Image (cartoon, grey):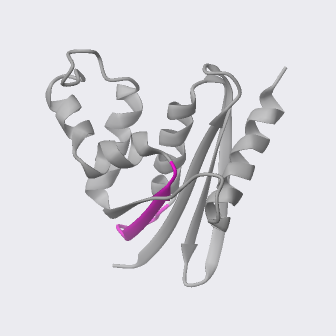
Amino acid sequence: MKTVTLYTDGACSGNPGPGGWGAILEYNGVKKELSGGEDNTTNNRMELTAVIRGLQALKEPCIVELYSDSKYVIDALEKGWAWGWKKKNWIKSDKKPALNPDLWDILLALTQKHEVHYHWVKGHAENPMNNRCDELAVAQWKNRKV
């Protein structure tokens, strides 16, 4: 299997409000930037969407080194929380409903297709790829701001 690096970030102006997401796929020194947004969303929905869109862009099963500054995304996947929420009909251990089950459902299916390794990176710090994803995401929400 090919090993691909995926950097992702989501951004939102207000929560909810206009939001954007950015993703960068890198394979063999070639980079592909992806971005998009929604008029009325949340930061966490944009973080999830960035990962989903990045994984969906892959044409075959890959080993994916996923880098995100979202503890919400990385912890829920790496620690298996999202699978637990799904198993309990999208109810968390604190008996509250898990947010964004529609996106988690898509993302969990994609993680079954690929071998994903999770890496949390500090946001707005020294990681140039994460910073570029943030620029892509912010540009998207700014385009949607009224």
Stretch of the chain drawn in magenta: 58-69
- Number of residue marks: 0
Q: Check if residue 60 falls in the magenta segment.
A: yes
With respect to residue 21, does 65 lie above or below?
below
Image quadrant where residue 84 sits: top left
Residue 48: x %, y % from top left = 47, 40
Image quadrant where residue 130 sits: bottom right
With respect to residue 71, does 146 lie above or below?
above
With respect to residue 70, does 97 lie above or below?
above
In this rendering, would 40 be left or right of 97?
A: right
Q: Check if residue 26 falls in the magenta segment.
A: no
Residue at the spot 31% in from the left edge and 42% down from the top edge: 76
The quadrant of the picture occupied by the C terminus is top right
In this rendering, would 121 be left or right of 81?
A: right
Residue at the spot 66% in from the left edge and 53% down from the top edge: 124
Residue 118: x %, y % from top left = 37, 60
Image quadrant where residue 97 sits: top left
